[in-house]
Image (tube, rainbow, N blue to C red):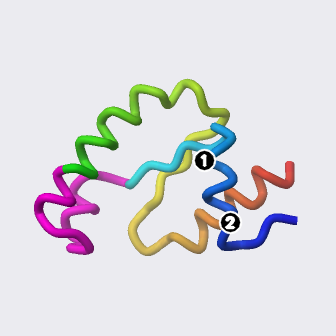
Amino acid sequence: MIERYELLEYALVYEFVFLVAESELALVERRAESRDELLVRIAMASEEIKHVMNFDYVVVIAEGKLENVVKLVESLIDA
């Protein structure tokens, strides 16, 4: 069984679930990173989104709904 903290890493490594933030604005409003870190993160996300078709599922991470995302990914892995 996959431990909860390993769940998202497992899903991403096996190109099973593509996780995407609800919007770039949500990333900015969180203020979790410096301006430079945020610019790098957004640039990386723009590049990563080009590979979305390689994944079986796309899950949008809505602000304040991380617990729901974890439950959804758990159910996709268990299916």
Residue 20, given in percent of the width and then of the height, sits at 44, 49
Q: Dot 2 surroundings within 10 Å: few (below 14), some, or many (20 or more)?
A: few
**Label 1: which residue?**
12
Residue 39, given in percent of the width and then of the height, sits at 17, 51
- Indicate which disc, 1 or 2, sits on the residue closer to the N terminus: 2
Q: Residue at x 55, y 43 (%)?
A: 18
User: Residue 31 magenta-drawn?
Assistant: yes
Residue 57, given in percent of the width and then of the height, sits at 63, 39
Q: Is residue 37 above or below residue 31?
A: above
Secondary structure beneath label 2: helix
User: Magenta part of the protein: which range?
Assistant: 22-39
Q: Residue at x 63, y 45 (%)?
A: 13
Q: Label 2 is placed on what type of residue?
A: Glu
Outermost residue on the left side: it is 35
Q: Label 1 is placed on what type of residue?
A: Leu
Q: Distance of mark 1 from mark 2, alpha carbons? A: 10 Å
Residue 49, given in percent of the width and then of the height, sits at 40, 34
User: Residue 21 magenta-drawn?
Assistant: no
Relative to 77, 58 lies left or right? left
Relative to 11, 39 lies left or right? left
